[in-house]
Image: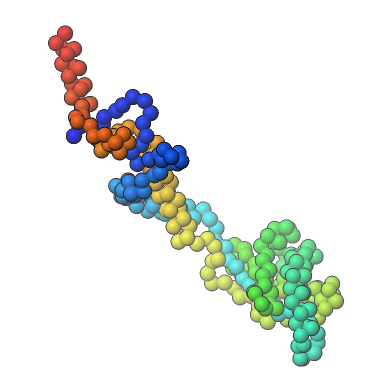
Amino acid sequence: MGKEVKTSGTLENPSVKRNPEDDEVEIDLSEIFYLLWTHIVQIVGLFVSGAVVVFLLTFFLVTPKYTATARMYIISGSNSVVDLSSLQISTQLKADYQELIKSNNILQDVIDNLSLDEDVDTLKGQVAVTNPSDTRILNISITTENAQLSADIANELAKQAKTYLPKVMKTDEPNVFEEAQVPDHKSSPSYKKNALIGGALAALLYCAVIIIKHVTNDTFVTPEDINKVFGVQPLATIPEGRKQSSKRRRKKGE
């Protein structure tokens, strides 16, 4: 068996078959799998390299952030016995509370009381108000680059909401049943997650490149490739190396 046997014109890749009836392209998945398997060392190497690079970039360039959460309970009615109507009203109030807690007036009071060196829009981007499904509980979460500051802002925001919102909405004040604690661990970034994503992207990009090169390659390499496309078995092959050497001999003889 010699080297590649090249032909003139555009030839179809043996791993890409065309159905003459419906003109649909069929790709031989077994050959694609074998192609990837022959490059498994490079794929694994790129996965590890990509993971290491992204991990180092995340570790040195991304500032860790910390999230602290204060929790409020929405009530309606001053009676000790909560009836069905009060439950329905409290449920309707959740959406209003979620929006009003992030209002400019409350946020500005938080900035003034804590002497924060930031504007209302910046603080608003650090606030997340969520409501667990089928509950009347609001979670006021603050995410900053300082763990203590996150807890302070969350507690101050809950305090301001407790006194400010009942005046605006003419309802009973919510109860702050759990104050925010200083977080022990960062909420972001996740080094493991980022490293896995980086490694996967590097490996997938390399796989895409070699598959595209293989599918678009129109060169016959073995006699079996010609048989797959034309349905005929070549009787002989002419190695390119010997062909070139014979030309050189002729030149020397001249």
Q: Tell which of 187 and 17 is nearer to you.
A: 17
When the figure is inspected, residue 150 is found, relative to residue 77, above or below; the finding is above
Left or right: where 119 falls relative to 223: right
The x and y percentages for residue 98 are 73, 69
The x and y percentages for residue 19 are 41, 40
The residue located at (59%, 73%) in the rendering is 182
The x and y percentages for residue 152 are 66, 71
Q: What is the total number of numbered labels drawn onto the structure image?
A: 0
Left or right: where 179 falls relative to 112: left
The x and y percentages for residue 115 are 72, 65
The residue located at (26%, 31%) in the rendering is 4
Instruction: Please say whether residue 216 is visible from this viewpoint.
Output: yes
Instruction: Please say whether residue 42 is visible from this viewpoint.
Output: no
Question: Which quadrant of the view contains residue 71?
Answer: bottom right
When the figure is inspected, residue 12 is found, relative to residue 189, above or below; the finding is above
The residue located at (78%, 63%) in the rendering is 104
Left or right: where 241 falls relative to 96: left
Model colouring:
rainbow
When the figure is inspected, residue 78 is found, relative to residue 123, above or below; the finding is below
- Position of the C terminus, as image quadrant, is top left
Q: Tell which of 66 and 21 is nearer to you.
A: 21
